[in-house]
Image (cartoon, grey):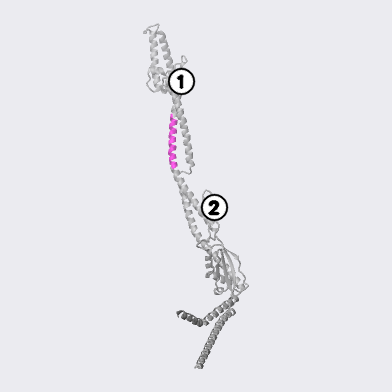
Amino acid sequence: MSSSSESLVTIEEKTTKEYYWLRWLKYLLLSAICNGALWGLALTYLKKTPPTFTSELIIHVAGGSPGVSVNLPSIGQANTSSGTSFGAHSDPRENYKLMATNASVLKIAAESLKISESEFGKPNIELINNTTLLLLEVNAPDPQVAESKAWALYHAFYQRLNVLRSQEQEERDKAVQQILEDTRVKLTEAQNKLSGYKLQSGFNSSEQIKDLIGNMGNLQAELIEAISQYRQNNDSLQQLATTLRLSPQKAADALVLQTDQEFQKILTEYTDATTILTNLLPSRGHNYPDVVEARQKQQASLEALLQRGQKLLGIPVEQLSLERLILDNSNGSGVKRGDLFIQLVKTNADLKGLEGQIAILKEQIEDQKAKLNVLTAKETIHDNLDRNLQIAQAVFASTLTKIDLSKGDPFASFPMIQIIEEPTLPAEPSAPKPKLVLAGAFVGSLFVTGGLTLLWWREPLLKISKQIVKKAIE
């Protein structure tokens, strides 16, 4: 009984050893196959893959251009604002990245090298963070070809930028030319309106109003002077009239009689007759022949005086008024009285002249005021038209200046680019990289071996865990 049990144990041990041997052999074979395949692929890749050379080109994308400000004398200021192409939500390098990998740019680059687009390939472009730089990488199986491709790509990209800038400038020119034409039409209309109004109204400038106001000032000064002189002459006239107890017209009549020779002759006869009569009356009666004769001569002379006076003065003359008009020079007092009469008449004539002058001055001033009102109304219209013309001139000049300034900045939408590092001539291939491939194969082998080892220890670990669980339950 004991011998049979021992034989059973021996058979079981022998079976277990065979199982583990076969299992170990299986995992060893699987590990050899997996690692062999991994290393075979790596070595095949290194052997079969042709070398690739990469030429690198670094480009700087310029920021915004500085603003320009131009002062236009008597018009205003024209300026172009400064700006930057880089913003919080925009980066021109992204646009340039798309443009550089665009089919049209790649086609131009390939044609410059006389190769196909597929042979030229697609470049790799990276944006260097926190800079304004672009890194362009071009691959080729030969170092010189890679460098040539990089230069071709740069020139094609630069050419495309120039084309886009030209197209943009042409479109802008079309728009601004239309704006410029509109401002030119408005300027011409403003000029024609002002010229037409000047021709129609006769108003040319504010100097006309200044001259008119100056003339009015002179006329008012003359009026004040004439009124002052009139008052002085009127006072003198009133004083003379009071002294002589005679009106200016009567004084003029007296001077008319004084200058008439016939009247003076009759006056002499009347005076002589009156003198004779005066001398005869004290010694003789009224009916004495001499007295009667003298009285008749006196009466005849008086009637002749009245008739002559009426003829000279044009109005009926009474004896009393005639006696007041006669200037008797027998005792010399008539001369002084005649001078006063002359002064009275002259003063009255001056007064009449001043009255006429004052009336004319007032009429001229009123006429000037009416003209001033008309010119003021015309000036308002003229100023409005002139202001519109100045505005049109300012807008036209400003528009023209802005157009000229905008032509000087072709990099507004497409910033200027500069080569920071010219295309490199690679000394070593960028792919394949043996060290990297071998390192990858080695790491892969480690993962394969580690995985198979875990699979090898899976059953013993399961048995141990089951025993632990069973003991824990018991």
The amino acid type of the residue labelled 1 equals: Leu
Q: Nearer the viewer, residue 340 or 210?
A: 210
Which residue is the site of mark 2? Answer: 70
Q: Position of residue 373 (x, y in %)?
A: 43, 40
Q: Residue at x 54, y 74 (%)?
A: 118
- Circle 2 or circle 1, nearest the eye: 2
How far apart marks 2 and 1 lie (CA) works out to: 82 Å
Q: Crowdedness of circle 2 by 10 Å Cα count: few (<14), some, many (20+)?
A: some
Q: Position of residue 411 (x, y in %)?
A: 54, 61
Q: Position of residue 270 (x, y in %)?
A: 41, 14
Location of residue 351 with respect to 271 vertically, above or below? below
Residue 133 location, quadrant = bottom right
Disc with the residue nearer the chain's start (2 vs 1): 2
Q: Main secondary structure of the magenta part?
A: helix
Secondary structure of the residue carrying numbered label 1: helix
Residue 125 visible in the picture:
yes
Q: Nearer the viewer, residue 265 or 12?
A: 12
The amino acid type of the residue labelled 2 equals: Val
| Residue furthest to the left | 287
Does the segment drawn in magenta span residue 255? Answer: no
Residue 200 visible in the picture:
no
| Residue furthest to the front | 2
Q: Nearer the viewer, residue 290 or 128?
A: 128
Secondary structure of the residue carrying numbered label 2: strand
- Tag on residue 331? none
Where are the magenta residues, as a range?
A: 355-376
Residue 243 location, quadrant = top left
Which residue is the site of mark 1? Answer: 340
Q: Nearer the viewer, residue 41 or 84?
A: 41
